[in-house]
Image: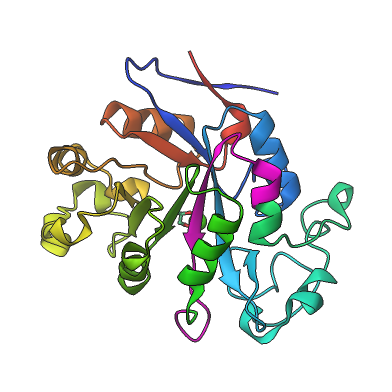
Amino acid sequence: DEKIQLTKQRRKINLIAHRGASDVAPENTLAAVKKALQGPADYIEVDVHQTKDGAIILMHDATVNRTTNGQGTIASLTLAEIKKLDAGLWYDSAYQHERVPTLSETLALVKGRKKLLIEIKKGRDGLYNGIENKILAIIQENKAQNWCILQTFYDPVLENIWKNELAVPTHKLIVAKIPFIPLYFDHRLQWGNFDKYDRAMAINANQYFTTQGFVKELHNSGFKTYPWTVDDPQAINRVLALGADGVMSSSISQLEIE
Ligand code: G3P
Ligand code: CA
């Protein structure tokens, strides 16, 4: 395996395995989480949705269509129905019979060996009612509040998390709305200031949104920032050189800090 050498850093950089080690295993499965546990990642990022019967499962899309052999929205399927699906075959026959994991199964596997960065997604028809409280209850049951972080694009979800007595750290996700010219795009035109996210630890933008001014402004306001999804070695070194606190990457298994 060829390794990607990252520029030496004098500060602690957190490498985040995007959707698990999704470069070597099917994304958002226990196989991908296991590979990420064995590799260089400091954090493991996963995406979660809510099933028809209120279970919290790992998947990126709002439907099971792309990453399983089934069809339909997660919100219209029960956990039992989703558990019958194959979540590995689409990726490689070596992963046939891999199942869609629940968040509880994922916590039981990780057991605090690395940090788990849980991204709360929405369904086809909008935000899942009460999803954040279910996730917080699962984190509490597993005594995982010291090694879980919750991140989302959606402010109502963050606000509900901040109201909860279980103080799980949060990251706010943002995305540039103007693709392909963003290296020259002044984020302040769109985002104003970040005061309303004061209770978040980090504000994470897509990599093209991550300029030197953006990183500086976040650091001056006390936020960390972990750009996503940075897979190309030059792009990873670019955002780290700008001062990013780490990087979410789907090339995680190949990364190595010199
Ligand atoms: O962590 C942020 C990043 O994962 C968002 O993109 O679509 O891969 O979930 P996506
Ligand atoms: Ca994600």
Q: Quadrant of residue 247?
A: top left
Residues shaded magenta: 107-127
Q: In this view, does 162 lie above or below 29?
A: below
Question: Is 90 contained in the magenta span?
Answer: no
Q: Which colour scheme is used?
A: rainbow
Q: Horizontally, is 84 left or right of 129 in the view?
A: right
Which residue is at the front of the view, 169 or 93? 169
For the point 55% across and 48% down, which residue is it?
144
Q: In which quarter of the image is residue 162?
A: bottom left
- Residue 18, position as x, y percentages in the image: 54, 46
For the point 60% across and 21% down, which residue is it?
3
> How many discs appear?
0
Question: Is 125 contained in the magenta span?
Answer: yes
For the point 32% across and 14% down, which residue is it?
10
Which residue is at the front of the view, 71 or 185? 71
- Residue 50, position as x, y percentages in the image: 59, 74
- Residue 196, position as x, y percentages in the image: 17, 62
Q: In which quarter of the image is residue 74?
A: bottom right
The quadrant of the rendering that contains the N terminus is top right
- Residue 229, position as x, y percentages in the image: 46, 47
